[in-house]
Image (cartoon, rainbow, N blue to C red):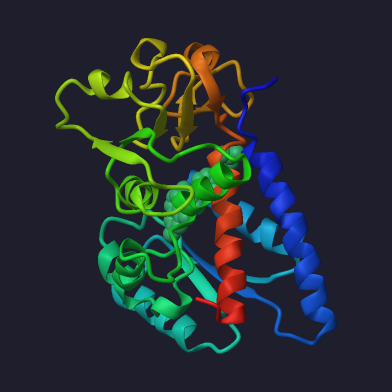
Amino acid sequence: MSNILDGKGLAQQIKDEMATEVASMMINGDKIPHLAAVLVGEDPASQVYVRNKVRSCEQVGFKSTLIRKDAGISEEELLAVVEKLNQDPDIDGFIVQLPLPKHIDEHKVTLAIDPKKDVDGFHPSNFGRMAQGLPAYLPATPNGIMEMLKRYEVPTEGKEVVVLGRSNIVGMPMSILLAQKNYPGNASVTICHSRTKDLEEHTRRADIIVAAIGIPEFLKANMVKEGVVIIDVGINRVDDETRKRGYRLCGDVDFEGVSPKASLITPVPGGVGPMTVVSLLMNTLKASKGTV
Ligand code: L34
């Protein structure tokens, strides 16, 4: 049997389920979920991700609004865009795609988003609620990973989990969720980062590794044990002249080397990325129903 955790296929299945639900909402005359995305500048990867989000909205029958702004937009102007979306009664939830240009304080922008519309789950109020196990919008990538573990019935209770990376949007929330008294959770979680001594000593003990450090093919076969479950969050573009686009995508895991040792592994692309997108849609559906 294949050891692939097929995020792409699973995301499609969840979108099909959501499309059915949206169709019946429409018949009942309920409000159709409406997501807005703000994209600042021309970052090529961000354009792809946001396009995937907008396209997925169309697939499930959501309304979507894409607001594009020049990279030169001032912080003040961007905050005004956020405020307008906060006030717009037709918008159920919205995101400001990261990263933002250097002259804009991401933290300030995140704080300006109404937590009730913060379908990215980045606002400290949502993060704090998540950390305390209260109803909250969960950040899309960790939430997508949790959904994937659940649907594939991956055992997590009592497992040794190593999270590589401590970012606010992936590593930190992921480690909190996996330690919580829930399924998928109840794991013993270790966070490793740039100051970790003897990282391999940790990764070799791990039953589950979540790699989110942004270094292409960082995790090698000799760093993991037989039967490990690998969640590869990395999505790196590396130059490749044999490809038409001039680059190929790879994760933070050396897939070729690690896959033969892994009981389960997410590919890149087609693993965590599509689950991130679908979990944003799940949050938007909740926002439109007012269930968070
Ligand atoms: N505000 N900023 C905000 N919210 C987010 O949730 C994100 N993230 C991360 C970057 N900045 C953000 C995303 O949307 C990463 N991310 C994301 C979204 C979608 C995909 C990857 C990352 C995705 O669709 N990946 C596809 C391939 C894409 C490609 O061809 O380049 C995949 O199969 O992995």
User: Which sits in the foreground, 86 or 69?
Assistant: 86
Residue at position x 36%, y 34% from top?
A: 161
Q: Name the side, left or right, on which 163 lies relative to 30.
A: left
- Number of numbered markers: 0
User: Which sits in the foreground, 228 or 159?
Assistant: 159
| 280 up-or-down from 149: above or below | below
| 68 up-or-down from 207: above or below | below
Q: Position of residue 21 (x, y in %)?
A: 76, 69
Q: Position of residue 37 (x, y in %)?
A: 53, 67
Image-quadrant location for residue 106: bottom left
Image-quadrant location for residue 6: top right
Q: Is residue 42 visible?
A: no
| 115 up-or-down from 10: above or below | below
Image-quadrant location for residue 253: top left
Residue at position x 82%, y 72% from top?
A: 23
Quarter of the image where the N terminus is located: top right
Q: Is residue 230 visible?
A: yes
Q: Residue furthest right?
A: 27
Q: Position of residue 290 (x, y in %)?
A: 56, 82
Q: Name the side, left or right, on which 107 lies relative to 214.
A: left
| 101 up-or-down from 85: above or below | above
Q: Position of residue 133 (x, y in %)?
A: 37, 65
